[in-house]
Amino acid sequence: MKKLIEIRPMCTPLMIGLLLLSFWAQSQQVGIGTATPDASAQLEVASTSSGMLIPRMTTAQRIGIVNPANGLLVFDMSTNSFWFTKGNTWTE
């Protein structure tokens, strides 16, 4: 009985680690409105009655983003248009 008590504390972190690993392995793609997101997409949003709302901001806020990631997409309310980063520049 004493050996079981000594082994049990070691098993708990192992079980937690295996549980977290299983969650990570199962959550490669995220689907909203679909139970089976396309394997080529990290995020798939499916709907026949509504759209997806991209972050909205003013031109000053958009230009103020420090080191925007290549491909970052925003809706600029000052120009009433979509903008994305291509290299180090914003493209309308």
Image (spheres, helix red, strand yellow):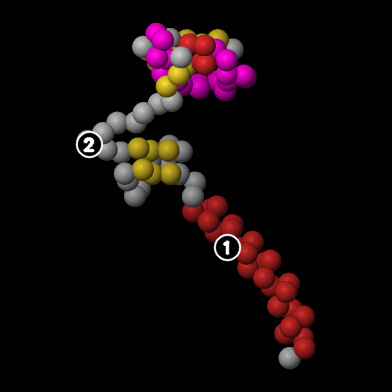
Magenta stretch: residue 71 in it?
Answer: yes
Question: Quadrant of residue 83 in the image?
Answer: top left
Assign a secondary structure to mark 1.
Answer: helix
Amino acid at dot 2: Thr
How many marks on residues? Answer: 2
Q: Residues within 10 Å of mark 2 (few under 14, many from 20)?
A: few
Q: If the image is split into quadrants, where does the C terminus sit?
A: top left
Question: Quadrant of residue 81 in the image?
Answer: top left
Magenta stretch: residue 23 in it?
Answer: no
Q: Earlier in the sequence, mark 1 or mark 2?
A: 1
44 sits to left or right of 18: left
Residue reaching furthest to the left = 49
Amino acid at dot 1: Leu
Residue beneath disc 1: 19
Please give the name of the residue rendered at 64% of the width and 61% of the height, measured from the top-left corner.
Answer: 17
Q: Residues within 10 Å of mark 1 (few under 14, many from 20)?
A: few
Determine whether 15 is above or below 87 in the image.
below
- From the top left corner, tell me how far across and down residue 78 is, in percent: 41, 10
The circle drawn on residue 48 is 2
Please give the name of the residue rendered at 77% of the width and 86% of the height, measured from the top-left corner.
Answer: 3
Residue range of the region highlighted in magenta in the rendering? 63-79
Main secondary structure type of the part rendered in magenta: loop
